Image (cartoon, rainbow, N blue to C red):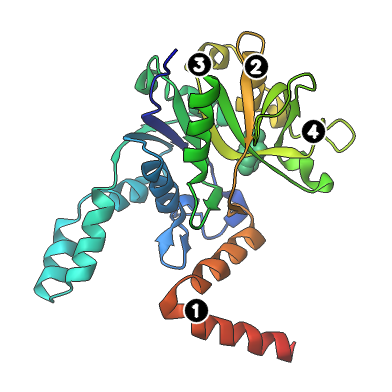
Amino acid sequence: MSVQKVRKAVIPAAGLGTRFLPATKAMPKEMLPIVDTPTVQYIVEEAVESGIEEILVITNSNKHCMENHFDKDYELEARLTESGKTAQVKMINDIANLANIYYVRQKEPKGLGHAVLCAKSFIGNEPFAVLLGDDVVVNKGGKPALKQLINAYERHKASVVGVQTVPKDQVNKYGIVAPNKNVAADGRAVKLDNLIEKPNKEEAPSRMAVLGRYVLTPEIFELLEDQGAGAGGEIQLTDAICRLIDTQAVYAYDFEGIRYDVGDKFGFIKATVDFALDRPELRGQVMEYIQSIAKSK
Ligand code: G1P
């Protein structure tokens, strides 16, 4: 049996960004730059490199500049052209041509499950990806995290959530999966029995946390439509995926790559340092600076 290709992705970006106030008072958190590139651009690039053709961003009324970022800017282009800055002209045009990006507003902040439900008519009856903007994943020299999940989806013909192991004292920050003990793991993929959103240490069924990447079958929408509020009083995507297990197989895939929690201040700083060290034009200076503070503190 062949499976439908995963062509569409949803990027929920309607969060208030309260962990990054005051920066996010007037600016969407998705536009905070890591070195010089907004975090949401890394997410869109991952989707495109994974074969995604159409992207729906779930926004709110405060997110106009994200739409501008992925649009053409004729005035800027004209000015850069006049001053002979051809590399920059190419850079801004490449961003505008990255993908077909659409936007829809989530009218009330009712949680991630509710945000994904806003994509129902855009997705229709096909499998789709979800990428969360707080999780930036780098897999240097390897396949992007989402591509790894899409491959697992094609192999198992079932929904796949991307996971990695987290320390025991952090399970309460994530959706935690329970592998089915009767089905042997297939490489990095395990069949699931259950998922729990933000369990406490004692009730967590494993340390494998869902880290912002999903490939889902469209049946998830029927479940999201009548999904009640869960952890934090919000409609949780994790709870609907858990109910999906009653009618179809769901897998977790332990993806390769370094994941940065850029929704967290320290995670953001780590991403900034690592991404800067990866830039040939910055590496030398940044390294020298880090070494000098390490010696002096
Ligand atoms: C969301 C999901 C959670 C997942 C996490 C990954 O939580 O609900 O299942 O583990 O993203 O970053 P949030 O961080 O939005 O509270």
Image quadrant occupied by the N terminus: top left
Q: In the rendering, at what x and y percent does residue 279 appear? A: 45, 72
Q: In the rendering, at what x and y percent does residue 117 appear? A: 49, 22
Q: Amino acid at mark 4?
A: Pro
Assess whether mark 3 and mark 4 are in contact (beta carbons under 8 angstroms).
no
Q: Gap between marks 1 and 3, in whole Å?
A: 45 Å
Visible residue check, residue 14: no
Q: Residue beneath label 1, please? A: 283
- The mark nearer the N terminus, 2 or 1, is 2
- The mark nearer the N terminus, 4 or 2, is 4
Secondary element at image label 1 = helix
Relative side of 154 to 78, left or right: right
Q: Nearer the viewer, mark 4 or mark 2?
A: 4
Q: Gap between marks 1 and 4, in whole Å?
A: 40 Å
Q: Residue beneath label 3, please? A: 221
Crowdedness near tag 3: few (<14), some (14–19) or many (≥20) residues, C-alpha within 10 Å: many
Secondary element at image label 4 = loop
- Can you say whether 74 is above or below 153 in the image? below
Q: Amino acid at mark 1?
A: Arg
